[in-house]
Each structure stands twice: as C-alpha cells, then as structure tokens.
Amino acid sequence: MQVPTLIERKRNGEALSADEWAELITAYTGGRIPDYQMAAFLMAVWFRGLTNAELLALTALMRDSGDRLHFRDLGLPVVDKHSTGGVGDKTSLILAPMVASCGVAVPMISGRGLGHTGGTVDKLESIPGFRTDLSLRDAEAQVRRLGCAMIGQTGEVAPADKKIYGLRDVTATIDSIPLIAASIMSKKLAEGLTGLVLDVKTGAGAFMPDLPKSIELAQTMIAIGQAHQCPTIALLTTMDHPLGMAAGNALEVKECIEAMRGEGPPDLMEVTYALGVAMLQVGGVERDAVAARSRLEAAIDSGRAAGLFAEIIAAQGGNPAVVDDPSLLPQAAVQGVFEAPEDGVVRRIEPRPIGRGIAALGGGRFTMDDVLDPGVGFVISVRPGDPVERGQPIATVHAKHDTDLEVGMAVLRSAISFGEPASAVPLISHRITAGGVEPWPGAPA
C-alpha cells in the first residue's frame, strides 16, 4: 500500500475500495502509518467527502476494530440514545433508567465533556464512588441483570475510532459530516443495538449550529443505521439556550434526580419525553406516541425510574442514597445570586459562554487531562421571553472560592441579554427517519 497514492486519489475525489480502506485503517491503528500521513488523508476526506460505500466500510472497520456487546439472546429490544452535545444537556441520566423501566434494555455508552459542551460520563462521576469504567463484559452482565448500564468508552470499544478522533481533534478535521457520522455510529453499533435514537442539537450552542447541516448529519447516521439493521430515529432539538436550569456536573445530576421525582423543568422534560417516546417506538414496545408517553410518565410518577437509577448507581460503585438526598452530591464552597440588572424581558441566554464559564470555574475541560471540580456551575431560573424586574434573582453561581464568584458573575452578564424578545425557537423542530424529514407538531414548517 502506497499511502501518498491514497492521499492523492482522495484529494482528487476518487473513492477507495473496501479492501483499501481495510488496509489503511489496520495499518494506522497498528502504528505502521505515521500521524502526518493520516492527517493529510483526513484533510482530503474533509474536502472531498466519502461515498456511501466508503462511509459504510469505514464505520464497520472502526466498529470491528474492538470488542462488542452481544444481546442476541436477551429477548428484549436493545436501544440507546446519542446526543451531539450541548450545555445543560442531561437527558441521558433520566432517559436510561426511565426507558429501561419500561422493558427496553439500555446499554448506554457515553463520552466526556470537552470545550463548551458537557459530558454524561463527567456528570455520572460526580456521584460519589460511581464507576463508568466497567469492562464490556461487566456492562453486559449488568444490562442482563438490571436492564441498563451507563459507562464510558473504554479501549475495548472501537479503538480505531478513538485513535482517528484524537488526530482529527488536533488537525481541524472534526467538523466533517461523514467522519462525525462514522465515528458516532461505529461506537453505537458496537453496543449490539436493535434501535437507536439520535438527539441532534442545532443552534448557537450546538456543535452543528446550521439547521441544514444538522439535518444532513442526522440523515447520514440514519442511513448507516439502516444499512446495519439498526433502525434509527433522529430528533432535531434546539441548543439556542441551555437545557433545563442547571449547568455543571453535580448540579445537573441533582436536577435529573428532581426530574425523576416529577419536578423537572418543563423544557428538560419535554425533550426527555420526546426522546423516550422515540426509544420505545424504535424498540417496538409502543407504536403509538401517546401510549408511549403515558408509559414513560407512569415510570416517573410511580418512582420506578428513580428506583432503577439508585440500583444502577449501587451496581456501579456509587452511593445510591443521593437519589433520596441529593445534598450528598459534591457542592461548591460558595454561591452567589445574580440579579437582573434592569427591568425588561430576557432576550437570550447564550449557551457557549455558559459552557465556557463552567470550564473557567473548574467544572469543564480545556484539555482531556484537566481534573474537574464537580460542584461548580450555574443554575439559571429564567428562560428567553421571561419578564424580569431590576434586582430580581435570576441565577446562582456555584464556585470554589470568592475570586471565582466574580468570574461566574461576569459570565452571566455576558451570556444573558435583555430587550425585545427574540423569535421563539421550538424545543424540537424535526423528526427524521429513513422515510424522510417531518416538522415536529407545532414547530414552524
């Protein structure tokens, strides 16, 4: 194999064969191709894209580069959800136990936060003792026993993707739709799923802020799922403002526990229930959306979801008492109340400054080696369009010490603007399946 020739062909828009892809990926993960050559190849892909055949070949190669979960004999639908990431995006913590308590196996493999976006693994690890580093065999056994496991990507899962992603992260090739789709789907297909739901964020705080690009990404992943006999549904949800009120690891866990008691913020619950309905539908448990929603609400109202969450926490080494007493979660040393600086209407709450502010307080990463303070963050009690009065408490900063408190206040001053209300942005804009793109009921066409 002549790597420069492959780079040149891809640069010129040619397609590689499945055998050439296999040789390339195997050689790179085996250390026989230097990073600089693979970086040049990935940049060629960024410019030229991939054919459908290439996309499917790359996804399967990355999936098969490691171990996989196996649930063929389980007798239950096996469904997971993936989000493209955002600020305050905590639905996974509610969805996993809620959906699992409705008769669907949920082997949830999640990631860590980086930059302005949070990560499910970091949120879970803010629970004292909680381990996300289970082996695949231990996770598989837990799913068989409890119906759910919530773990991080280990070296067992799609190691070729992990190595390629690390190179993309430092070579400005992250935002390639085919490479994003292959990366996400290689890991999800390794879970042995019978169905998948995608939460594709769009808007100011999303990785893919442009709506047409978000739709293209969703359709690309759906096509991969269909080709691998994994029916996939995508919902396009807004990330024009943080989801829910809490932003910060332990603060978000607390909000999720409150949500499982029936006390969650309306926007968080609306998106969570919509994703849960899609999970029950793609799993074949409920076809009718109204019946699926009622089933999920019953899991919350009866306490089954919260009870299962406590069992999952205990099984993974954490303290299940946090479900009854969230004050056992890590807490910041100091809190400060942010007041509305003027009379008026909340115009915008910019998610990116909030996400970067969490990192500045010590609750997020600028590099993957950063150690997090799980207790810091923000709780914002207003939403765009809400009227406020000067001096009204509208948010709280949770910080390590007094000097960080002013950092958090400055973040809120820059992120929250007032004036004439901006045009309302629907929480959910579209539902996308292999059959096409449908506007969400009530959303502008």
Image (cartoon, rainbow, N blue to C red):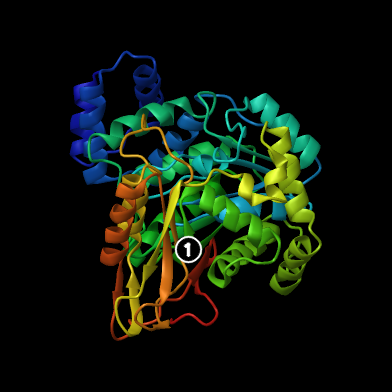
Q: Quadrant of residue 70?
A: top right
What amino acid is at disc 1?
A: Leu
For the N terminus, the quadrant is top left
Q: Position of residue 107 (x, y in %)?
A: 65, 40
Residue at image point 47% right, 45% down = 119
In this rendering, would 143 be left or right of 190?
Answer: right
Looking at the picture, tell me which residue is in the foreground, 74 or 259.
259
Callout 1: 10 Å neighbours few (<14), some, many (20+)? many
Circle 1 is placed at which residue position?
Answer: 243
Q: Quadrant of residue 114?
A: top left
Q: How many marks?
A: 1
Q: Is residue 444 above or below residue 177?
A: below
Q: Position of residue 190 (x, y in %)?
A: 57, 34
Q: Is residue 383 above or below residue 253?
A: below
Residue at image point 48% right, 70% down = 430
Looking at the picture, tell me which residue is in the foreground, 243 or 199.
243
In this rendering, would 254 be left or right of 5?
Answer: right
For the C terminus, the quadrant is bottom left
Q: Is residue 21 above or below residue 444?
A: above
Q: Quadrant of residue 162?
A: top left
Q: Secondary structure at mark 1?
A: loop
Is residue 283 visible from the viewing direction of this image? yes
Is residue 70 visible from the viewing direction of this image? no
Q: Position of residue 28 (x, y in %)?
A: 34, 20
Q: Position of residue 414 (x, y in %)?
A: 26, 64
Looking at the picture, tell me which residue is in the foreground, 344 or 209.
344
